[in-house]
Image (tube, helix red, strand yellow):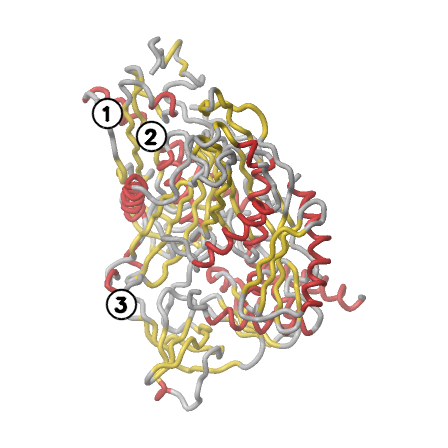
Amino acid sequence: MKEKKIQYVKNGKRLDGRKVDELRPIKIEAGVLSRAQGSAYVEWGQNKALAAVFGPHEALPQHIQNPKKALVNFVYRMAAFSVPDRKNPRPGRRDIEISKVCSEALEKAILVEKFPNTMIDVFVQILDSNAGTRITGLAAASVALADAGIPMKDMVSGVAVGKAGGEILTDLTKDEEDAPDAVDMPIAILPNTEEIVLLQMDGLLTTDEWKKAKELGIQGCKKVYELQKEALLKKYKNSETKQKKQKPKTKTKSKAVKK
Amino acid sequence: MDKKLVVPGETVSEERKRTGDNVIIRDGKIVSTALGLVFENDTTAGVIALEGVYIPKRGDIILGIIESEVFGGYIVDVNHSLKSFIPKKSMIKTLRKGNVISAKISEVNEVKEISVENVRVFYGGELIEAQPVKIPRMIGKNGSMLSVLKEGTGCSLMIGRNGWVWAKDGDINLLKKAIKKIEKEAHLNDLTNLIKKFLEKNKTKKVSK
Amino acid sequence: MSKEKPIWELKSEEVKKALRNGERLDGRKFDEYREIIVEKDLYKNAEGSANVSIGKTKVDAGVKLLAGEPYPDSPDQGTISVGVELSPLSSPEFKYGPPSEEAIEVSRVVDRGIREAKTIDFKKLCLKEGETVLIAFIDIYSTDHFGNLFDTSTLGAMASLLHSKIPKVEDGKVVKGEYSGKLPIDSTPLLCTFSKIDDFIVVDPSIEEEKATDARLSISVNEKGVLSAFQKGESGSFTLSEVDEMIKIALKRTKDLRKKVE
């Protein structure tokens, strides 16, 4: 830890120049993979996530089948090279927990009752990371599900809000997450009804701070939703104007998301 | 293009109407459950999905591949999350693993298992995988697109609602290209004419070579 | 091997029918690769990284260089460790869990091709003899499987190694987040894989061709045209003259591949 106290917000600007409620640049592309039924690639600041959807297919072994609904199997994995130190390729407790809470978040959006006794796989691979990867993965997963044509009552959009140096901030970076008083609060909603489908928090947060964080969270989620929507519609608007088929992951400049 | 594109969760109509495909009601509004195109008339509002898996309906004609023979019947892969079963006693012909068949769905039970009838076997030819949601476009109004495809490629064709297309004879490679084109441009108007022109253009090329 | 869907058997028949007519299903010549695209330096946390596609087959590869202990029999040498994950994102046939035989074979072939070609002078990775050396971890994830993950993975590994940075070292220790330059690479071995289907031999098999394969041969060739690894797979066999013919083609095709990674 540095001895000098870091000022996380100075003249309304954060360490990386963003405003308190500003997201990092986000780029979303739908349908980047061919073998999967649906897919998406999301760049969120330095975070990069790829999502692939398979199914619904028969849930096996048979005893896990549910005659009332499809099971949603979101699997979160980090590439070994996606962190500053090499990640052990075997999934840890963190990977498993994230997979569970994200599966549950997506299940709320998917019309699971349409596919009894089946399973819908949503595989997320994190390729590069800098705080907020579960939300990046979830954003990719939701677009990939829509791209696969899995019936859903809404998208799932999320953001991590939190606290650093006493300030409530949207979309924290690793540097901000390293603050001594840091709070990390990932939140995901169904954007059209504002139902909360994922909420986690660690750190110390007063009820006043929660009110602020909650507001920033919903605001952030809705901005992410707009980008998800844009990415899905773009896939079709492109073919309409007969543009050349885009190569996935082109190095086009990411678009900054301003308030 | 006049039709509106929507994503899951977006409002399709705020009026009280009958619900068409791929929509649900939320707070009195009709909301999309799919990425697709809005269709709305005076009485109904729904969405034509642009992506999606096959959802079986009674009466649909589908294609299948015999996966294995078991006691009393055959297990059939019908490009659906659950396999189908054809009882041996329901048909005279003997089927073998790898046979391509067509069948009519006689029943979809409450857990979406499929029963079929009117089984027909297809020998030779090729099975082409297409997107199930685009199949209606490949058939067209009153089979208009199907006729265009048959005439333009010279193929014998059988289109299954479950996304599988069986073809024999004719220019199968051209057919595959046409199918890809329909999938990509399914949301465009006047698709039948586009495909007709596409087939004519590519056909003449081949002759001149 | 997972149980094959019946549709693949039908496709195998189509592959064979086309070959008998002197054609491949995708219109390629027998000795022709699909389109190759290499994108480098995509992921900041990796010392080197690449996204590589051969046709629709795609992998993401990344290199991490970490300090570790040397092997007792080579106390002054660093080493490499290659892991190929046949990721479930890339095909419904692949499952999460311990690496399959298939994944281990691909990893080992990529590893040997690079190691035996003396791609990296391992002595240059020694930090303190007998105590600390640098280990290059090369991790490769398939993201779209349409055949020939052997060549695609090797291409991914080489593309990320060739553009990898080397961490700064002070007093025999790695300084986190700082780099002293580029990882020294002495050779660029690349893999060229063939499928024998009935009596036909094709290079860079597509997934339909892989499913119809009787015998497979992968040949690793370095920039000087020297062979650095072979791997024969599947239950069929080759004649010696067939192997000679494949070596000839591999020498040509690896030259083209090399242009894409350098």
Q: For marks 1 and 2, give the CA distance.
A: 13 Å
- Give the residue at mark 3: B110
Mark in front: 1 vs 3: 1
State the image coordinates of residue A199 (x, y, percent, origin top left): 26, 35
Say which element carries label 3. Answer: loop
Q: Tell me which residue sits at (65%, 67%) in the image.
A: B173
Is residue C133 or residue A115 the one in the foreground? C133
What's the chain of the residue with tag 3? Answer: B
Specify whether A38 is left or right of A238. Answer: left
Residue C5 in view of the camera: yes
Q: Are marks 1 and 2 in contact (CB under 8 Å)?
A: no
Say which element carries label 2. Answer: strand
Query: Residue A203 has which mark?
Result: 1
Say which element carries label 1. Answer: loop
Mark 1: give few (<14), some (14-19) or many (20+) Cα within 10 Å.
few
Quadrant where the N terminus of chain A sits is top left
- Give the residue at mark 2: A160
| Mark positioned earlier in the residue sequence (1 or 2) | 2
Q: For marks 2 and 3, give the CA distance.
A: 40 Å
